[in-house]
């Protein structure tokens, strides 16, 4: 299967499960609303009856927020400090629903039952894999950047001319990015192995790394293309947001709709990535399975033929002896 | 590469302008009390300077004196016990991990003679009375024979300077040398009538962590000897270059009517020049920042245009802008007469205007410090505050803020935020001596708050009057040593001429509150009251000439309305209040702000919708402008707008982390 086919099939697979997409979008917005509701209330109370807040309709008013900090900084800081918990909850939910996503990909038709069964069934093992890869990502970060930082302390050329420093840092960022993406891909394919072969976690991870290394060009291409498309989406959103004035409630609502469409697209892109990877993985997985099965069948036939011949020879020998 | 070629052609066309200065001598502009002829040789291997100077110093006081005092600034970096190092304990000083003797700096006087007398250096002693630190060696007092009023003496001093590793404006960084505060510099002998002095005494403070400098004007003839491969930039102008036999060259510089002399040397400098309105603007840039050369030059040109239009003519023939390595940022963002240092970063995008901002700020110091030579140690706001105020004006006029995703802010907004968001807004008055500022308050008060005090003053007196104040201040005090009082006297004089009754007899009330005290300004519009009073159908009918019929409710009612304001802080400022009625009618009220509260009453057929104190945003010192206004019909639309922005941001953030699984 070429990348293009994986991509097209992945898109079809994604759109076939549009109910799931809406559900994932709902999870996203509802999680965010946990903080937005108190933010709305706090801003409303903090603004009190000031006329200054009207300036926010025509643009950004730096002074308004500076002065808001005089009176309400702690209240807003409390909200912002809760962000880490919201991120954690959403991260866990994303792991939870990934099992469901893969499960429904494996069905001809979307079913809520399959989605939730998959979510519950694989959650703990997926969580474990994600944690292992999280640790690997941290180790990767340390392995690349600690030597870099140490080198800046001892290598005169690096520190006397920051241009060299930036160039080397830039190269390292690219290098880090490639390795990080590789880990991310291995994490994804480990999960597919877990679902399809029901292997234990460590064998699944090893199989994931093996799969990525055997098919690096294609898996990398699928991943990267899935990251490039959202950039175009952002470009479109960015230009639209510049042209829409949000001075009235109508403008704000239109902007809100565009923003939510953008977020919905991001959900689609994310699911599309998994679907493309899934398509590619299952194609290779099934292909290998078929080859294996054929080989087994052929080996069976050979065995049986040999036995039959042996039996025929035995029978013939017996009848000759009798004669 | 194309750009580089362009630059090289550019250089070859214009760099040969040094001949402009040969044999150049300018009209005497200052009293020229301390004149230095210095010969100095840089040893790039040992990081040392061998210096010999002849100082022609005039006793301008009416008294006979028997002691000379000198600044030996380099001794601030001699060890951990200097006042400078003790006061900088909270910083991550370069000396925290100091293990090598090579990284310290000091100055040692080898010989000191007055009018060819015997060597007096052994009789000199270090003064430490000011900070009570006996180990500080940054001020040296030398007993001398009587020096009569108006007598000029020749003081010959030989010395060795060991340069410190890059720290606080001076030192070395590999093969880059920033030589500032390097020679024995005589203090300022003040006497009654000069600044705030009551009697004749030396003004020669120890080198403090926050303090900068103060010196008499004079002429500096400096011969600098460096290895041939080094490029040099210096205060003043180069008038002679000589190549020596030992692979060194001697460069002769002259700086007239200046209070200091600073120079830099590096193998890597690339030189750019442009002449603008008779002033030579030179940039010595490091290769990694070459693309920023034109940005610095253009910023300096904008600064020249601005200062010449609102303050006065630039008094020197040239300005040299010196680039510093990023990792030696201790050299950056500093000002010296006709030489300023900037701070740049490779690949800095065009829309980040930090290079321009630093260049403009430091150029401003050639007015406020170099020409209007206030005592930077005792009244630092007179140079830093003024430079920041003018810098912000130039930035706002020439570099409109760039909006990113709809977010933008102006330079004065940042200065105001520095002050209003500081932990303790009443920690110290602006007019403190530099070493008296509590921890971390120096920058906020002398730069940011002082700048917004001056902007508030401009808003109160008007832009034209402020220009007149600036011009008068400059013309009257250039090449002299003004104090805050001198500036305030000029403000009072000009404002009185304008006869603006709202500002009072003079502006002392303004400076007392903003400069000499730590008062807070916080006006609040507490409430708006609209009390509906039934006018009765009959009265309403008769007023409108009707004898029958049903009248709309709003006509049947009148309103007794009021607006109540208060001053939550101690500061009182005259303010204007805009009161907006439902009918669209608007009234502007004036309040001198002296009472704790004030209520304005109205009655009529329409009610007050909203009101706003200081509606033209004159008082930048008001720490909370959000409570300056009040509306009876608060709109929730802006709250919805920013909540939806917050929602969108949050959705993106959590989605990002949701992909890392």
Image (cartoon, grey):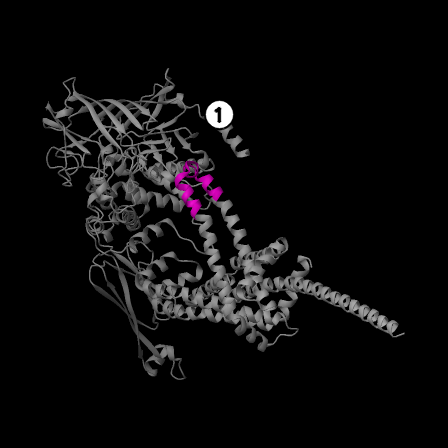
**Chain at numbered mark 1:** B
Q: Residue furthest right?
A: A323
In the rendered image, which quarter contains the N terminus of chain B? top right
Q: Is residue B635 left or right of residue B389?
A: right
Q: Is residue B176 left or right of residue B143?
A: right
Q: Work out whether B415 lies above or below A15.
A: above
Q: Main secondary structure of the magenta part?
A: helix
B432 and B592: which is toward the camera: B432
Q: Work out whether B255 lies above or below B245.
A: below
A266 and B294: which is toward the camera: A266
Please state the horizontal and vertical placement of residue B177, each as a whole percent of the image. Answer: 34, 31
Q: Is residue B427 left or right of residue A172?
A: left
Please state the horizontal and vertical placement of residue B182, each as a whole percent of the image. Answer: 27, 30
Please state the horizontal and vertical placement of residue B90, each as a whole percent of the image. Answer: 26, 47
Residue B21, by quadrant, is: top left
Stretch in magenta: A146-168
Residue A71, by quadrant, is: bottom left
Q: Work out whether B582 lies above or below B218.
A: below
State the SS at label 1.
helix
A60 and B5: which is toward the camera: B5
* Residue receiving disc 1: B12
Q: Is residue B440 visible?
A: yes
Q: Is residue B147 visible?
A: no
Q: Badge 1, how many Cα within 10 Å: few under 14, some, many 20+?
A: few
Residue at left 63%, top 68%? Answer: A15
Is A157 included in the stretch rendered in magenta? yes
Q: How many marks?
A: 1
Is B159 included in the stretch rendered in magenta? no
Q: Work out whether A109 lies above or below B191.
A: below
């Amino acid at each position: 299967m070429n990348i293009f086919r994986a991509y097209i099939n992945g898109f079809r697979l994604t759109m076939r499960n549009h109910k799931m997409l809406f559900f994932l979008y709902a999870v996203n917005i509802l999680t965010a609303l946990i903080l937005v509701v108190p933010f709305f209330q706090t801003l409303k109370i903090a603004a009190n009856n000031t006329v200054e807040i009207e300036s926010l309709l025509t643009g950004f008013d730096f002074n308004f927020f500076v002065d808001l900090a005089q009176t309400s900084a702690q209240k807003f800081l409390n909200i912002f400090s809760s962000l880490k918990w919201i991120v954690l909850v959403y991260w866990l939910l994303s792991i939870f629903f990934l099992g469901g996503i893969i499960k429904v990909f494996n069905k001809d038709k979307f079913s809520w039952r399959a989605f939730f069964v998959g979510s519950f069934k694989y959650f703990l093992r997926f969580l474990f894999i994600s944690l292992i890869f999280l640790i690997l990502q941290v180790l990767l970060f340390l392995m690349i950047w600690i030597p870099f930082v140490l080198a800046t302390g001892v290598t005169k050329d690096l520190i006397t001319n920051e241009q060299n420093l930036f160039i080397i840092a830039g190269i390292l960022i690219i290098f880090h990015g490639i390795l990080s993406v590789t880990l991310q891909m291995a994490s994804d394919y480990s999960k597919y192995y877990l679902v399809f072969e029901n292997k234990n976690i460590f064998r699944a991870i090893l199989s994931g790394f093996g799969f990525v290394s055997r098919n690096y060009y294609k898996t990398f291409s699928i991943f990267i293309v899935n990251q490039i498309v959202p950039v175009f989406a952002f470009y479109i959103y960015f230009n639209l947001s510049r042209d829409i004035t949000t001075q009235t409630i109508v403008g704000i609502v239109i902007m809100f709709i565009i923003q939510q469409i953008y977020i919905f697209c991001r959900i689609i892109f994310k699911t599309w990535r998994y679907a493309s990877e899934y398509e590619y993985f299952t194609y290779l997985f099934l292909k290998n399975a078929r080859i294996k099965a054929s080989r087994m069948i052929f080996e069976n036939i050979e065995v049986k033929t040999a036995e039959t011949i042996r039996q025929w020879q035995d029978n013939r020998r017996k009848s000759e002896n009798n004669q | 590469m194309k750009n580089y070629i362009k630059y090289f052609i550019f250089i070859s066309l214009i760099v040969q302008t040094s001949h402009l200065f040969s044999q150049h001598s300018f009209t005497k502009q200052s009293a020229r009390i301390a004149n230095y002829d210095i010969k100095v040789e840089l040893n790039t291997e040992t990081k040392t300077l061998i210096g010999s100077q002849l100082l022609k110093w005039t006793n301008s006081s009416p008294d006979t004196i028997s002691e000379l005092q000198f600044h030996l600034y380099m001794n601030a970096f001699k060890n951990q016990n200097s006042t400078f190092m003790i006061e900088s304990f909270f910083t991550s000083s370069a000396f925290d991990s100091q293990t090598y003797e090579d990284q310290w700096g000091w100055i040692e006087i080898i010989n000191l003679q007055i009018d060819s007398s015997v060597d007096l250096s052994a009789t000199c002693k270090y003064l430490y009375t000011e900070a009570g630190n006996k180990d500080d060696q940054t001020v040296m007092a030398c007993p001398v024979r009587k020096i009569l009023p108006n007598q000029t003496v020749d003081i010959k001093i030989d010395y060795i300077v060991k340069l410190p590793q890059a720290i606080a404006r001076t030192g070395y960084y590999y093969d880059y040398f920033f030589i500032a505060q390097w020679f024995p510099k005589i203090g300022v002998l003040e006497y009654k009538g000069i600044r705030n002095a009551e009697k004749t005494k030396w003004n020669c403070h120890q080198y403090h962590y926050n303090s900068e400098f103060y010196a008499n004007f004079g002429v500096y003839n400096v011969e600098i000897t460096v290895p041939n491969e080094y490029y040099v930039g210096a205060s003043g102008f180069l008038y002679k270059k000589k190549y020596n036999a030992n692979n060194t060259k001697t460069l002769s510089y002259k700086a007239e009517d200046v209070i200091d002399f600073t120079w830099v040397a590096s193998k890597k400098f690339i030189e750019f020049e442009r002449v603008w309105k008779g002033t030579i603007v030179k940039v010595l840039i490091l290769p990694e920042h070459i693309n920023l050369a034109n940005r610095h030059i253009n910023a300096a040109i904008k600064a020249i245009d601005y200062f010449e239009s609102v303050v006065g003519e630039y008094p020197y023939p040239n300005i040299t802008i010196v680039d510093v390595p990023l990792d030696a940022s201790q050299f950056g963002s500093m000002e010296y007469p006709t030489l300023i240092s900037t701070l740049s970063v490779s690949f800095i995008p065009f829309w980040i205007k930090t290079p321009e901002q630093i260049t403009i700020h430091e150029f401003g110091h050639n007015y406020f410090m170099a020409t209007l030579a206030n005592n930077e140690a005792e009244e630092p706001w007179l140079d830093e505050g003024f430079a920041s105020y003018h810098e912000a004006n130039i930035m706002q006029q020439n570099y409109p803020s760039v909006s990113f995703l709809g977010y933008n802010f102006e330079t004065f907004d940042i200065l105001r935020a520095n002050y209003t968001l500081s932990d303790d807004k009443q920690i110290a008055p602006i007019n403190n001596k530099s070493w008296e500022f509590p921890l971390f308050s120096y920058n906020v008060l002398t730069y940011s708050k002082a700048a917004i005090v001056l902007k508030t003053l401009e808003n109160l007196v008007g832009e034209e009057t402020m220009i007149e104040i600036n011009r008068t201040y400059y013309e009257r005090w250039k090449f002299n040593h003004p104090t805050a009082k001198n500036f305030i006297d000029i403000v009072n004089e000009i404002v009185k001429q304008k006869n603006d009754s709202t500002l009072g007899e003079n502006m002392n009330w303004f400076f007392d509150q903003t400069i000499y005290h730590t008062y807070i300004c916080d006006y609040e519009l507490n409430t708006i009251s609209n009390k509906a009073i039934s006018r009765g159908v009959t009265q309403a009918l008769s007023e409108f000439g009707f004898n029958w019929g049903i009248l709309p409710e709003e006509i049947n009612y009148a309103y007794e309305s009021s607006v109540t304001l208060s001053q939550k802080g101690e500061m009182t400022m005259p303010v204007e209040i805009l009161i907006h009625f439902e009918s669209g009618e608007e009234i502007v009220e004036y309040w001198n702000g002296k009472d704790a509260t004030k209520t304005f009453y109205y009655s009529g057929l329409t009610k007050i919708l909203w009101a706003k104190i200081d509606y033209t945003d004159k008082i930048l010192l008001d720490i909370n402008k959000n409570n300056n206004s009040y509306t009876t019909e608060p709109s929730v639309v802006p709250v919805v707008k920013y909540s939806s922005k917050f929602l969108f941001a949050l959705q993106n953030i959590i989605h990002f982390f949701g992909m890392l699984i």
